[in-house]
Amino acid sequence: MPQFQKLRELLEKNYSWPAPYLFKFIIPTEKEGEFKKILGLDETIKQYEVRASGRGKYLSFTFSMSIVHSDEVIEVYQKAITIQGVLSL
Protein backbone atom coordinates (compact mmCIF):
# COMPACT_ATOMS: atom_id res chain seq x y z
CA MET A 1 0.00 0.00 0.00
CA PRO A 2 1.30 3.44 -0.86
CA GLN A 3 0.56 4.89 2.60
CA PHE A 4 3.12 2.49 4.07
CA GLN A 5 5.89 3.23 1.55
CA LYS A 6 7.64 5.73 3.85
CA LEU A 7 7.49 3.26 6.74
CA ARG A 8 8.92 0.52 4.51
CA GLU A 9 11.81 2.81 3.53
CA LEU A 10 12.53 3.67 7.17
CA LEU A 11 12.41 0.03 8.22
CA GLU A 12 14.79 -1.00 5.45
CA LYS A 13 17.16 1.83 6.33
CA ASN A 14 17.18 1.29 10.10
CA TYR A 15 16.88 -2.48 10.54
CA SER A 16 18.91 -5.45 9.46
CA TRP A 17 16.48 -8.33 9.02
CA PRO A 18 15.78 -10.70 10.66
CA ALA A 19 15.38 -8.72 13.87
CA PRO A 20 13.03 -8.33 16.81
CA TYR A 21 10.54 -5.50 16.39
CA LEU A 22 8.57 -3.85 19.21
CA PHE A 23 4.94 -2.96 18.55
CA LYS A 24 2.80 -0.70 20.72
CA PHE A 25 -0.87 0.01 20.15
CA ILE A 26 -3.49 1.91 22.10
CA ILE A 27 -7.05 0.74 21.64
CA PRO A 28 -10.46 1.49 23.12
CA THR A 29 -11.12 -1.00 25.92
CA GLU A 30 -14.23 -2.35 24.22
CA LYS A 31 -12.14 -3.39 21.18
CA GLU A 32 -9.85 -5.70 23.17
CA GLY A 33 -11.35 -8.97 21.92
CA GLU A 34 -11.38 -7.85 18.30
CA PHE A 35 -7.80 -6.59 18.55
CA LYS A 36 -6.52 -9.82 20.09
CA LYS A 37 -8.30 -11.91 17.46
CA ILE A 38 -7.12 -9.90 14.46
CA LEU A 39 -3.48 -9.85 15.58
CA GLY A 40 -3.45 -13.42 16.89
CA LEU A 41 -2.65 -12.47 20.47
CA ASP A 42 -2.92 -15.51 22.74
CA GLU A 43 -2.64 -17.78 19.68
CA THR A 44 0.56 -16.88 17.83
CA ILE A 45 1.80 -14.08 20.10
CA LYS A 46 1.83 -15.48 23.60
CA GLN A 47 3.81 -12.79 25.40
CA TYR A 48 2.48 -9.27 25.47
CA GLU A 49 1.89 -6.55 28.02
CA VAL A 50 -1.45 -4.84 28.55
CA ARG A 51 -1.98 -1.69 30.60
CA ALA A 52 -5.22 0.14 31.19
CA SER A 53 -5.41 3.92 31.05
CA GLY A 54 -6.14 5.85 34.23
CA ARG A 55 -9.85 6.02 33.51
CA GLY A 56 -10.00 2.57 31.95
CA LYS A 57 -11.22 3.79 28.56
CA TYR A 58 -8.12 2.60 26.70
CA LEU A 59 -5.66 -0.27 26.77
CA SER A 60 -2.07 -0.21 25.62
CA PHE A 61 -0.69 -3.41 24.12
CA THR A 62 3.06 -3.89 23.79
CA PHE A 63 4.68 -6.94 22.24
CA SER A 64 7.77 -7.96 20.34
CA MET A 65 7.93 -10.18 17.29
CA SER A 66 10.81 -11.73 15.41
CA ILE A 67 10.52 -10.19 11.94
CA VAL A 68 12.17 -11.54 8.80
CA HIS A 69 11.28 -8.69 6.40
CA SER A 70 9.85 -5.18 6.67
CA ASP A 71 6.66 -6.32 4.93
CA GLU A 72 5.80 -8.37 8.03
CA VAL A 73 5.82 -5.20 10.15
CA ILE A 74 3.53 -3.50 7.65
CA GLU A 75 1.16 -6.49 7.66
CA VAL A 76 0.71 -6.14 11.42
CA TYR A 77 -0.06 -2.42 11.07
CA GLN A 78 -2.48 -3.11 8.21
CA LYS A 79 -4.39 -5.58 10.37
CA ALA A 80 -4.44 -3.21 13.35
CA ILE A 81 -5.80 -0.21 11.46
CA THR A 82 -8.92 -2.16 10.51
CA ILE A 83 -10.05 -1.62 14.12
CA GLN A 84 -11.80 1.68 14.68
CA GLY A 85 -10.02 3.88 17.23
CA VAL A 86 -6.66 2.08 17.24
CA LEU A 87 -3.50 4.15 17.58
CA SER A 88 -0.04 2.83 16.81
CA LEU A 89 3.05 4.21 18.46
Image (cartoon, grey):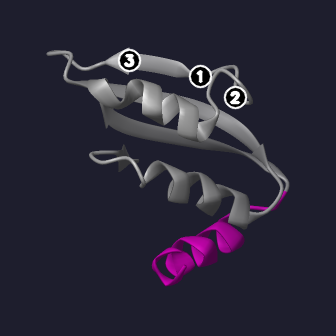
Find numbered disc 2 in the image and state the secondary structure of the residue it sits on: loop
Q: With respect to residue 10, does 88 lie above or below? A: above
Whichever of labels 2 and 3 marks the residue nearer the N terminus, that label is 2
Task: Residue 86: give x, y in percent of width and height.
Answer: 34, 45
Which residue is at 53% across, 52% downward? 79
Alpha-carbon neighbours of circle 2 within 10 Å: few (<14), some, or many (≥20)? few
Find numbered disc 3 in the image and state the secondary structure of the residue it sits on: strand
Q: Which residues are magenta?
A: 1-17
Task: Residue 78: give x, y in percent of width and height.
Answer: 52, 59
Alpha-carbon neighbours of circle 1 within 10 Å: few (<14), some, or many (≥20)? some
Looking at the rendered structure, the kind of residue marked 2 is: Ile
The rendered magenta stretch, by its main secondary structure, is classed as helix
Could you say which is closer to the camera, residue 61 or residue 30?
30
Looking at the rendered structure, the kind of residue marked 3 is: Arg
Label annotation for residue 51: 3
Whether pointer 1 and pointer 2 mark residues with C-beta atoms closer than 8 Å, the reply is yes
Spatial CA span between label 1 and label 2: 7 Å
Residue labelled with disc 2:
45
Find numbered disc 1 in the image and state the secondary structure of the residue it sits on: loop
Label annotation for residue 48: 1
Looking at the rendered structure, the kind of residue marked 1 is: Tyr
